[in-house]
Amino acid sequence: MADLNRRSSPPPALGSRNCDDPKIEYKEVAYLAKFLTPQANIYSRKRTGFCAQCQRELKQAIKRARHMGLMPFVA
Amino acid sequence: MKLYEGMFLLDNQAVRENWSRAKAGVTDILAKYGAKVLTARHWDERKLAYPIKGRTRGTYLLCFFECGSEGVNQMRRDFEIDERVLRYLLVNAAAVPAGELEKSQAEGAADFAAPTPPADERVSAERMVFGEFADRPVVDRSRAAAPANDEAEGEESEVEAPVAGEGV
């Protein structure tokens, strides 16, 4: 049963981020786009490899960019 | 007085008429509520990720200003009403980024001319609601299934009519 439930290994994290770097900004659209699925969902922390604080910054930035029409809500 | 960053999405129609007037429209509202505008510049003109108020393109104006919190709350109402401002975003800023002041000043020079935005393609009402699905051919399922059900439908209507009458 355990074998049936076991999945293939998850995709590797996109990379980590140095938390001391300047805050993620909503204007850096090309950078933010790396953390979206083809349907424009935000990747989970597991996938981005970010710490909680960086992930929150990322989420905030993407949502601001979406509001301003810089990024899609759905693609 | 706190430092704020304001991003404004302006209607290309207003920008095409006169960039400095469109910009002044925003900075005047800022000044009206006691804000000290430090920088205001043309950030970019680009295609929007999704249609906003029927527009597919827009021009972004980036401002940095100092203002009290009362004023910021009051100016939001003015930006909502202003038809030239399609969207706005007001966020706290730690400091004015390096190079921002120079870019803003360069815009104030006499020989500066904002690039003229390309023609905007009008979005139909259907496209605004359904996006790219509006372009797909419509499959009329009722007609495709109609020949087989022709007789059945006729019978049903005959049966249903008396039932409705009895009820009344």
Image (spheres, helix red, strand yellow):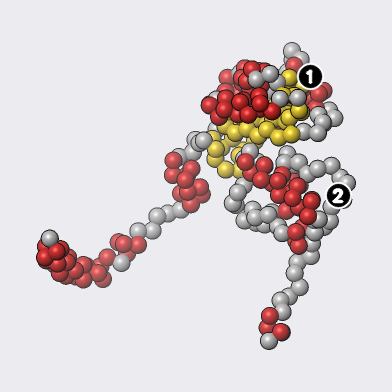
Up-down relation of residue B107 to residue A32 (above or below): above
Q: Name the residue under label 1.
A: B105
**Which of the pair B153/B69 is nearer the observer?**
B69
Residue B147 in the image: above or below residue A54: below
Residue B147: x, y in percent? 25, 67
Q: Residue at x 88, y 46 (%)?
A: A20
Which picture quadrant has residue B77?
top right
Q: Residue at x 59, y 51 (%)?
A: A74
Q: Residue at x 82, y 23 (%)?
A: B102
How packed mark 2 is, by other alpha carbons closer than 10 Å (few <14, some 14-19, many 20 or more), is few
The chain letter under disc 2 is A
Asked which quadrant contains residue B91, the reply is top right
Residue at 40 percent of width and 55 percent of height:
B138
Locate the C terminus of chain B and report the quarter of the image it occupies.
Answer: bottom left
Disc ID at residue B23: none
In this view, which residue lies farthest toward the bottom? Answer: A1
The amino acid type found where label 1 is placed reads: Gln
Q: Which residue, given by chain and number where applicable, does mark 2 sit on? A: A19
Q: What residue type is labelled 2?
A: Cys
Instruction: Tell if the residue under mark 2 belongs to the same chain as the one under mark 1.
Output: no
User: How far across and how far down the image is residue A28, in percent?
Assistant: 75, 42
How far apart marks 2 and 1 lie (CA) works out to 33 Å
For residue B148, side relative to residue B53 (left or right) = left
Label 2 element class: loop
User: In the displayed structure, does residue A74 sit left or right of residue A57?
Assistant: left
Q: In front of the other: label 2 or label 1?
A: 2
Determine if residue A70 is in view: yes
